[in-house]
Amino acid sequence: MTQLVFAEQPLTLSNVPEGMDALVLAQEAAELESGQILHIARDDIRMENIAELVSYFLPTIEVITFPAWDCLPYDRVSPNPDILARRMTSLVKISNPKKTQVIITTINAATQRIPAKETIKTASFSTAVGDQLDMEALTGYLSHNGYSRASTVVDHGDYAIRGSIIDIFPPGLKKPVRIDLWGDEVDSIKIFDPVSQRTEDKTNSINLVPMGEIFLDETAIRNFKRAYVSEFGPARNNDPLYEAVSEGRKHAGMEHWLPYFHEKLETLFDYVPDAHVTMDNLTLEALETRLSAISDYYLARKTALAETPVKSDTVAPYKPVPSELLFVGAAEWQTIADRMDFHQFHPFDVPPGDNVKTFRATTGRNFAPERNDKEINIYDALRKHVAALQQTGKKIFLASYSTGARDRLSAVLKDHGMAGHKLLESWKAAKRLPKDTIGLIILPIEHGFETERFAIISEQDVLGDRLIRKVRRTRKAENFISEASALTPGDLVIHLDHGIGRYVGLKTV
């Protein structure tokens, strides 16, 4: 495998189809004794997928995803709290690396400014069993850092205080924690189920990080008021954003004025100045689309503001932050790219040159022609293709999305003359597979690829998109109840993820 860790110039990494790029990242991370690799995906779907693939190929590495806000530039709504929590948790990990990290982000996240690294390092609150807990300091931290007081803790960012019991659901944890005090001393910290509210396990300490990128403390409020008035002039009485922030209250969409709350903002590249940076295929096209969208939304808001009468009894119009304060522009992006030597993955062949590294891999075969021919059995075509690849000395791996799908595939292969296969639980085991044995792996890869030594064939390549990909539908509660009421105990049902089952009834928890 060609190494790019020591490259002193930006490289085009040719013949690296999607899926193999994750393997390249994993192998490069394995070569690093310490350090960070930053990969910029073109969108959130690619980010999540490549993170899963890297974790599969190198399970010992720390893989961190840094998503973008899930709202449009200059929107009136705030990003989803879970997204904000994930971003803050990731920034804390990136700020304090304890081992080699592979950081996967998107072009949207990479082009948006974030709180300074030093701010994130100090924006935490820790306590442990046996510590003296300052309740006033804790409640002040929670209220100023995006947490919401609730009667029952269910979602990330909720906290509840009942006498000497404090429930908190911090970002980065799968379940909330319950702090039990004895006077002012932390007697115990327990993990509990947010549904049943029953404790399940114990922990010795917790480390809280902010729920969002805006900290509504006195300094942040003062910074906002000064910057807001300086940019837009004295605030009127009908400006709900200015009123809410002045009173220390959260306001919907206030994250879009992020630069006014901080002394300075940085970019993700400032967090990892020495990282090895790689980019998806088509990322530069996604960058152009992103910058164009930011410009369009800003101009639309600015035009609307200019056309609004100064003296108006209506609610104050939207006052957009200048785009260069919140986003990275084209010129700044190029400066960063030149400084950090961005490496660009490319799935096809590129003419040779000093800045081109070729990996000699190709996209795997798609069995679409065979699927569309009623005279051809798709599994017979698969068997012939596998046999042809094995004759060239390549190892063959068939990738399924889940354990159940792999088990079904195993049964079908036996029925079509491919009984010589083995179920594999890891990529480490896959590398020890004999060449005459087909390896069945669980890998969420859409399309397979071939290298000089092995070939990965995905189920989607064989069976097609509709039969393989998971379908995620958002259904309203009333629709679910109406569907469930139409069932009779004993009816057979098919679950999207788990297959065939029998309906036995509903139980109120």
Image (spheres, grey):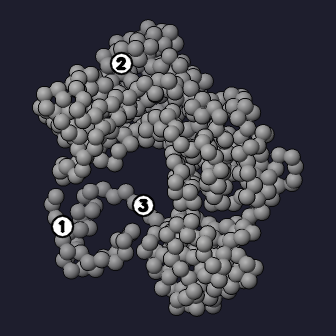
Q: Which mark is residue 472?
A: 3
Dot 3 or dot 1, earlier in sequence:
3
What residue did someone put label 2 on? 217
Label annotation for residue 478: none
Badge 2 vs badge 1, beta-carbon distance below 8 Å: no
Disc nearer the start of the sequence (3/2): 2
Residue 175 visible within the image? yes
In the image, what residue type sits under mark 3? Arg
Q: Is 43 on the left-hand or right-hand side of 243?
A: right
Picture coordinates of residue 364 (x, y %)?
68, 70
Do we see residue 52 in this rendering? no
- Amino acid type indicated by mark 2: Asp
Residues tagged 3 and 2 counted as in contact (Cβ below 8 A): no
The residue beneath circle 1 is 506
Name the residue at 46% across, 28% down.
120
Helix, strand or loop at label 2? It is loop
Residue placed at 73% from the left, 48% from the top?
4
Q: Is residue 256 above or below residue 483?
A: above
Question: Which one is in front, 406 or 251?
Answer: 406
| Residue 11 quadrant | top right
**N-terminal label among 2 and 1:** 2
